[in-house]
């Protein structure tokens, strides 16, 4: 079943919008109800995000691969799974979807559509956290999608559920999400000034994971770009090109 | 294995009754134990509902498709998956099951069988929330059931777990459930006056999702009504009709 | 792969002991840490029990069917899936395992090995709750094991996670567990005097579910006793008898 | 697909490092946010650990078997699934990875890289708890990996989620993790003096489980060492040796 690029981009747009809603919306709801109990609020934020990821990847995986994350599309470009032009389109759709998602979320909670977050998240510990979080995310996706693509939705949802708590930054691990969160002055927000270092750390983590996994499964870098693509999207593309 | 309509309707009746019990009963239990901690109460409500959905869809999916939701049966009618006469019967069974479920739940907690809820849920933000919640639910079901019907139970349970927190209305997303919740003056209730706008928003969301997915998988609307049905129920019906 | 009765009984014994540990032990831990927050304690009790069930059924399902519950073995006897003599042996192993489990749990928490619970749980609402809880449990097992035996562990874990909250009795739904809980004067306990009505309600619920499901899948009662057994255990037995 | 020992060791190193991060990091985050609510903190610790295990085993299972635990590798050596020389290498990689994991975790939270824990965990109840916890873990792995290797990640994640609460020791059940936790003076720490008894109890539990399961599936001990290996790793090795 061939799926055209425009439809795959629509899936990335809608999927990323819902992912942002899950992250930002559950933070707003948690903050409203928790009366200052930040621990409980983050737990609710975690459960909503992890569960939302499972649902969204199960729903959109068969359409677009459900990247929902520029770091994943970049890694797909690096591995040759996704042509670079398509990877660039994916990233645009994700960023636009993320911004649309944060606006709709604010409207659902009767808040101003666009806000400037004042939530400071900076310093070397935050940088290291984002780097580790994204390295882990990309490693989990690469490891699981190669051998067990049907389980990727559960692996990603479970990984983020854990990483919200085991990194000091609550594991944004997604540049599109980071941009959208800078537009929300709520629980999940991030000060616009802190966005660039977060994204740099995420890209560093993603790049390291791509190199690590390439070595782990022993495919030389030059060959990888020409080899048949692996993973869920890869198999769809193979069928397409026959 | 052909399953007669009456048996499928019995499955929808019992399944929807248990779904209402999961939603309303866990709200009552949470409220009794939480001593005013609304945040913890909603978390418990969420976990019970999400887990209950997983169990009920795994159990009744092979019998009736486990719609348990008039919005899902309407979408099934629109897509041609379910004949309109059967869709109407499904909806009746769901509404009756939902009412039976709320009565039995009240009896389990030694409360009056039928109550009028005084929980106000109104305004444009609530309307938008229900519209988004139902759009997402139907999109998740359509995306997952087409390519991976065996995972629908997990996708729906995970989606609702997230949507309880990322919408301002706690994602009713189900007209039968909305009616039943208006009969319970407890945590999960909704004022009878607010039922109609909620259902209107849900139907708008469901209709939008059906149109979106029809475009996403590129089936022209005229052809869709005649095409072989997709999804779990669809495959069962194909086997039936051979 | 034929598995002898003695080995299957050992699996039921160990599995039920761990199930009791999950229920009683997590109640003790929750009570110790929660400082009177009953709501949080029940949530922890719920999560430990639901997760424990998933693990135990995945582990012991391939050996003995992982009934871990006399109500399930009785229903297996009624449906012809399990010979009555084996069902009786299963029930003995489950009760002995449950008692062993509560003793080991108390020792792990440095408490007296056997205690008399003083936790009153009585009245018609509790009776109805246990009846509904067990009806639902058996219905979920029957529905899921017939069409999707590989998902039974998840369906049962999810169902009990929900039922802890949507019944007023916190869904014991298991006579062996009920007996063991009467021997523990802790969070999960039940007064010995309340055991008999609980078990009666459970058996009533189980019997109703067996009748309901027999009708739902349209197998006449007389034929069912002779028909080839269904479900995970049933398939194992078919292979055995070849 | 043959995977060389060095790559499998890299997977064990990285995987165990992330497992330690999940356990220790989520304890630090929980403690910082929970304001002394130990119950909520342990719940968050539990959810992060259980979810992390699911993700890591899904990701690294296809590479190295995802033991991430010297007790599992020892049991693999005993059953003949893993040659003893490889089991020893696995254990070294796990211990080194665990230590690396605790250092990186401390850096992510801007804490001293290596600390001496002051968290006392001793006495017979703790010993029994670790013995039971590890017996259960190894039994769940053996039962599930033999018949349903694709579900091991979920079984292990679910088991540990339960065992955190139903044992008095919060179920370390892993010698490498125990060593790493002694290097962290935070929520998940253990006093260095208490490490040896914990590991002894874990090994006793693991050994008992290996004997129990060997009997349960009726393979004589002498034959087991020569028989074709079972489980996920075993099948990979069979393919390798053809």
Image (cartoon, coloured by chain):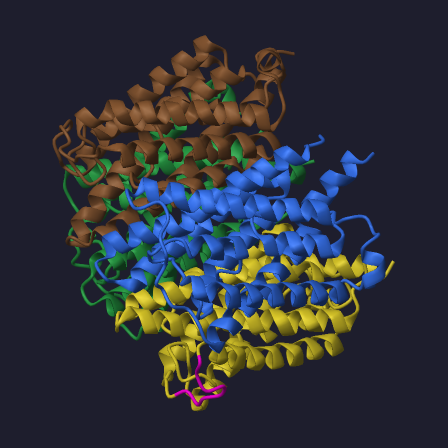
Chain colours: A brown, B green, C yellow, D blue
Residue at the extreme right: C242
Residue D11: give x, y in percent of width and height.
57, 37
Most foreground residue, D202 or D42: D202
Residue A191 visible at all: yes
Q: What stretch is highlighted in magenta?
A: C110-117
Does residue B61 show up magenta in the picture?
no
In the image, taking residue D4 as reference, residue A113 lies left or right, namely: left
Quarter of the picture containing the N terminus of chain D is top right
Q: Which of D37 and C4 is in front in this view?
A: D37
For residue A48, say whether it is visible. Answer: no
Q: Is residue B85 left or right of residue A202?
A: right
Q: Which residue is drawn at 33% across and 68% down?
A: C41
Residue A203 place in picture, x, y as percent: 37, 23
The image quarter in which residue B59 lies: bottom right
Q: Position of residue D51 (x, y in %)?
A: 45, 48
Q: Is the magenta stretch mostly helix, strand or loop?
A: loop
The quadrant holding residue D117 is bottom left
Is B220 drawn above or below residue C78 in the view shown? Answer: above
Q: Which residue reaches farthest top?
A: A85
Of residue C93 and residue D46, the one placed in the foreground of this image is D46
Viewer-nearest residue: D116 or C202:
D116
**In the figure, D3 relative to B161: above or below?**
above
The C terminus of chain D is located in which quarter?
top right
Please give the name of the residue rendered at 59% of the width and 46% of the height, measured from the top-left corner. Answer: D92
Q: Image point 38% across, 24% down: which residue?
A: A204
């Amino acid at each position: 079943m061939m799926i055209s690029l425009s439809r795959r981009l629509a899936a990335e747009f809608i999927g990323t919008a819902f992912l942002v809603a899950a992250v930002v919306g559950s933070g707003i709801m948690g903050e409203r109800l928790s009366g200052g109990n930040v621990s409980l609020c983050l737990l609710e934020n975690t459960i909503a995000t992890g569960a939302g990821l499972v649902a969204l990847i199960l729903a959109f995986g068969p359409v677009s691969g459900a990247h929902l994350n520029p770091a994943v599309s970049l890694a797909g470009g690096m591995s040759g799974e996704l042509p670079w032009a398509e990877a660039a389109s994916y990233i645009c759709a994700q960023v636009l979807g993320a911004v649309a998602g944060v606006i709709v979320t604010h409207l659902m909670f009767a808040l101003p559509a666009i806000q400037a977050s004042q939530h400071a998240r900076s310093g070397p510990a935050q940088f290291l956290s984002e780097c580790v979080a994204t390295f882990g995310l990309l490693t989990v996706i690469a490891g699981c999608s190669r051998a067990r693509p049907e389980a990727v939705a559960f692996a990603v949802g479970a990984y983020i559920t854990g990483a919200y708590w085991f990194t000091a930054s609550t594991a944004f691990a997604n540049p599109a999400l980071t941009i959208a969160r800078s537009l929300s002055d709520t629980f999940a927000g991030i000060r616009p000034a802190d966005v660039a270092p977060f994204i740099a750390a995420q890209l560093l983590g993603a790049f390291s994971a791509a190199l690590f996994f390439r070595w782990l499964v022993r495919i030389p870098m030059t060959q990888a770009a020409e080899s048949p693509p692996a993973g869920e999207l890869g198999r769809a593309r193979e069928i397409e090109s026959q």
